[in-house]
Each structure stands twice: as C-alpha cells, then as structure tokens.
Image: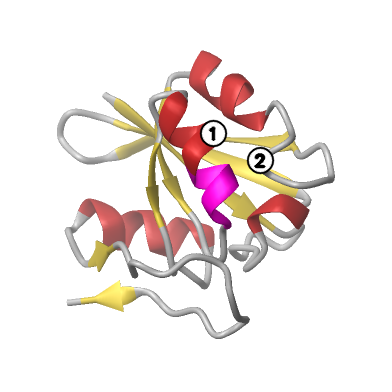
Amino acid sequence: MKKIALPVTNNGQIDEHFGHCEFYKIFTVSDKNEIIEEETIESVQGCGCKSNIAITLAKADVTIMLAGGIGEGAINVLNSAGIKVIRGCFGNSLEVVKQYIEGKITDSGSNCHSHEHQCNNH
C-alpha cells in the first residue's frame, strides 16, 4: 500500500503553487494499484519549505507528492521526510493520481520558476 498527496484548491484541482494551496488530498492506493481511500486535510498557508506539512504528511505515511509548481526548499524538506516529489502536474487530483498509477506521469524536472507548468505524460 502507498499514500500519495497532492496540493489542491477547494475544487479538487492541483494548485500550481505548492506553498499556497488550500488543502492536501491524500489517496491510499492498494498493492493492486486501486484507490481505496481519499482524505482531505487543510493546509496551513505559507511557504511550503517553512511549514510543517512534510512532517504531517510523513506521519500520515505519505511517500509521494504529485505537485504543480514547487520550489527547491519545499522539495528538500519533503525529500528529507521520505516523500518523493513529482513536479509539473496539473488538473483534477483524482485523474492525476490515476494517471500516475498507470505510469503516465513523470517528473517534469522543473522547479517553480515560472507559472508555465505541465505534466510530462508519456
């Protein structure tokens, strides 16, 4: 089983600014790659690298973060908590998780320097 988190807006879309998101969606995925649970936690507004969200997510057993725009500081904090970051994602959070499970999403390799983000879909 694995848990995947995404920074989202109140309508379930991935927020392109990790540190400014309103909520985090956490999806629990079974060993058969089926989504078996979904939960939403409120985000403490502020810079992602200075918040305690990495610790909160790690305590919830999250190991993967599917994010839109995210800075190097936040990536380092998440990685230090044992959470792998996949950058450049956008769209509906449920659909993005499904695409990730199917192996259709890879890391964009780009940190948050501009507002032009896209998923690297195969």
Say if 8 sits above or below 75 in the image: below
Query: What's the mark number on residue 49?
Result: 2
Mark yes or no: residue 21 visible: no
Callout 1 crowding tier (Cα within 10 Å): few <14, some 14–19, many ≥20 = some
User: Quick one: which residue is furthest to the right in this view?
Assistant: 45
**16 within the magenta span:** no
Residue drawn at x 78%, y 51% is 22
Amino acid on which disc 1 is placed? Val
Callout 2 crowding tier (Cα within 10 Å): few <14, some 14–19, many ≥20 = some
Residue drawn at x 17%, y 77% is 122
Q: Position of residue 41 (x, y in %)?
A: 70, 34
Residue picked out by circle 1: 77
According to the image, what is the colour scheme of the structure? secondary structure
CA separation, marks 2 and 1?
6 Å
Q: Pointer 2 and pointer 1: residues touching (CB < 8 Å)? A: yes
Pointer 2 or 1: first along the chain = 2
Considering depth in this image, is 109 or 3 the residue closer to the camera? 109
Residue drawn at x 34%, y 70% is 108
Q: Secondary structure at mark 1?
A: helix
- Judge from the rendering whether residue 110 lies leftward or rightward of residue 1; answer left or right: right
Amino acid on which disc 2 is placed? Cys
Say if 66 sits above or below 26 in the image: below
